[in-house]
Image (cartoon, rainbow, N blue to C red):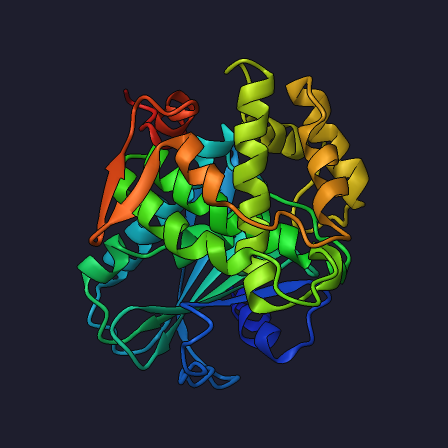
C-alpha cells in the first residue's frame, strides 16, 4: 500500500480514536497509573521519515512536541529496536509498518500500542523529559514490534500474543547483547509467578486477568522454549517455530487460528511441544507450581542477587537462552 506523508500522519493521528479490531495496549505494569499522555490533537504536526530494514520499510512519524531528545535520538532508538527484532526473526517480519512517536508527560517511554487492523501500526508515547538512558533501557517498543510478528487471534487467546511479546522481548534483547543475563532472570523470577493460576482459574483461554494474560502467556513461552530445546536435543528453539510462522505469511495484519499457527511452529521444530502445551494449559489451571522449573534451570534469587547452578539438569539450556548471538 503506497501512502503519501499527509495520509500517513492522518492515519496515525486518527487511529487512536478508532476502536481497533485487534490491538494490544502495553503500559509499564499493572500497577502503573493510567497514562497521563494527552493524545495529539487531530491537527497535530510532526515530521515523517522512512527507516529501511533490508526489504522492509518502517514509516516513522514524530509528533512536533518539545522533546528533550533530538529527532535523531528518537529515530536511532526505533532503528535499534527494529534491529533487535530483525535479528531474532532473521528478517524484519513485515514489509511495511508505521511507527508514531507521540509526546507525553514523563521521563521515559510511557506506553505502547500495536494495531493490526489497518496495516501494522505502532503508537508509542515517549515522555517529553525522556533521556537517551531511558531509551537504552526501554522494552516497550521492542515488545510492540514483536506483536507485529504474530497473527491476530481471537480475544480468548490474547495471552498468547502478549506472552510472546513479554518473553521474546527479553530473550531477543539478551541475544542482541543489550540486556544482561541477570536482568533476564530477575524479570522472569519476579514475573513468572504472577502468571500462575489462582483459585477458580479455568486455564489461559478462559482466565483473562492481567497476570495470566501477560505472565501466564510468558510462562507458556518459556516452557515451550525449554521443551523444544530439550526434545530436539538442542537442535531447535522457540525462535525456529516463530520464524516459521512468519515465513508462512502470518503477521499482525493477518488473523490466525491458534491450533493452525502452533502446528506450523511444531512442524518447523519436528516436535509437538507447542500443541501439547496448549492442550495442557488452555482450559485448566496448569502448571500449579514452577518451583522445580527454577531448580532444574539452576537459577535463583538470593538477597536480591541472581545466583546460578551450572550442575543443574537444564543449566545448558538456561545458558543458551540468553546467550548473545555474537558469542
Ligand atoms: Zn503487548
**Which one is in front, 188 or 54?**
188
Residue at image coords 73%, 42%: 280
**Quadrant in which the C terminus appears:** top left
At 38% from the left edge and 21% from the top edge, which residue is drawn? 316
The answer to whether any part of residue 59 appears in the image is: no
Rendering coords of residue 318 (x, y %)? 39, 29
Closer to us: 296 or 151: 296
Left or right: residue 139 versus residue 156 is left
Q: Position of residue 112 (x, y in %)?
A: 47, 65
Q: Quadrant of residue 266?
A: top right
From the top left corner, tell me how far across and down residue 99 is, in percent. 48, 59
Classify residue 167 as left or right of residue 176: right
Q: Quadrant of ligand 1?
A: bottom right
Identify which residue is drawn at 69% across, 76% down. Answer: 19
Residue at position x 60%, y 19% in the image:
231
Q: Quadrant of residue 105?
A: bottom left
Q: Is residue 37 above or below residue 132?
A: below
Residue 190 in the image, given as x and y percentages of width and height = 38, 55
Is residue 190 visible in the rendered image? The answer is: yes
Amino acid at each position: 500500500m503506497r501512502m503519501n506523508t499527509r495520509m500517513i500522519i492522518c492515519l496515525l493521528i486518527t487511529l487512536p480514536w478508532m476502536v481497533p479490531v485487534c490491538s494490544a495496549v502495553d503500559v509499564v505494569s499493572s500497577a502503573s497509573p493510567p497514562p497521563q499522555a494527552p493524545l495529539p490533537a487531530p491537527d497535530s504536526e510532526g515530521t515523517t521519515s522512512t527507516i529501511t530494514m533490508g526489504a522492509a520499510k518502517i514509516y516513522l512519524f514524530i509528533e512536533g512536541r518539545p522533546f528533550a531528545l533530538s529527532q535523531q535520538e528518537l529515530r536511532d532508538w526505533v532503528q535499534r529496536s527494529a534491529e533487535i527484532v530483525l535479528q531474532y526473526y532473521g528478517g524484519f517480519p513485515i514489509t511495511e509498518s508505521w511507527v508514531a512517536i507521540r509526546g507525553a508527560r514523563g521521563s521515559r517511554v510511557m506506553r505502547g500500542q500495536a494495531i493490526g487492523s489497518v496495516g501494522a501500526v505502532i503508537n508509542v508515547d515517549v515522555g517529553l523529559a525522556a533521556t537517551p538512558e531511558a531509551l537504552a533501557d526501554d522494552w516497550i517498543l521492542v515488545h510492540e514490534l514483536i506483536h507485529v510478528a504474530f497473527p491476530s487471534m481471537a480475544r480468548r487467546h490474547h495471552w498468547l500474543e502478549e506472552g510472546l511479546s513479554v518473553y521474546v522481548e527479553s530473550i531477543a534483547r539478551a541475544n542482541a547483547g543489550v540486556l544482561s543475563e541477570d536482568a533476564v532472570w530477575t524479570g522472569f523470577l519476579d514475573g513468572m509467578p504472577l502468571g500462575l493460576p489462582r483459585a477458580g482459574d479455568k486455564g489461559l483461554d478462559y482466565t483473562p486477568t492481567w497476570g495470566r494474560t501477560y505472565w501466564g502467556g510468558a510462562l507458556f513461552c518459556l516452557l515451550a522454549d525449554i521443551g523444544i530445546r530439550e526434545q530436539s536435543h538442542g537442535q531447535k528453539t522457540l525462535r525456529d517455530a516463530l520464524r516459521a510462522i512468519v515465513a508462512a505469511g502470518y503477521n499482525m495484519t493477518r488473523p490466525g487460528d491458534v491450533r493452525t499457527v502452533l502446528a506450523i511452529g511444531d512442524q518447523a521444530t519436528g516436535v509437538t511441544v507447542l500443541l501439547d502445551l496448549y492442550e495442557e494449559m488452555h482450559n485448566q489451571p496448569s502448571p500449579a507450581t514452577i518451583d522445580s522449573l527454577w531448580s532444574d534451570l539452576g537459577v535463583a534469587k538470593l538477597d536480591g542477587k541472581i545466583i546460578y547452578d551450572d550442575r543443574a539438569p537444564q543449566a545448558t539450556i538456561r545458558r543458551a537462552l540468553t546467550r548473545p548471538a555474537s558469542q
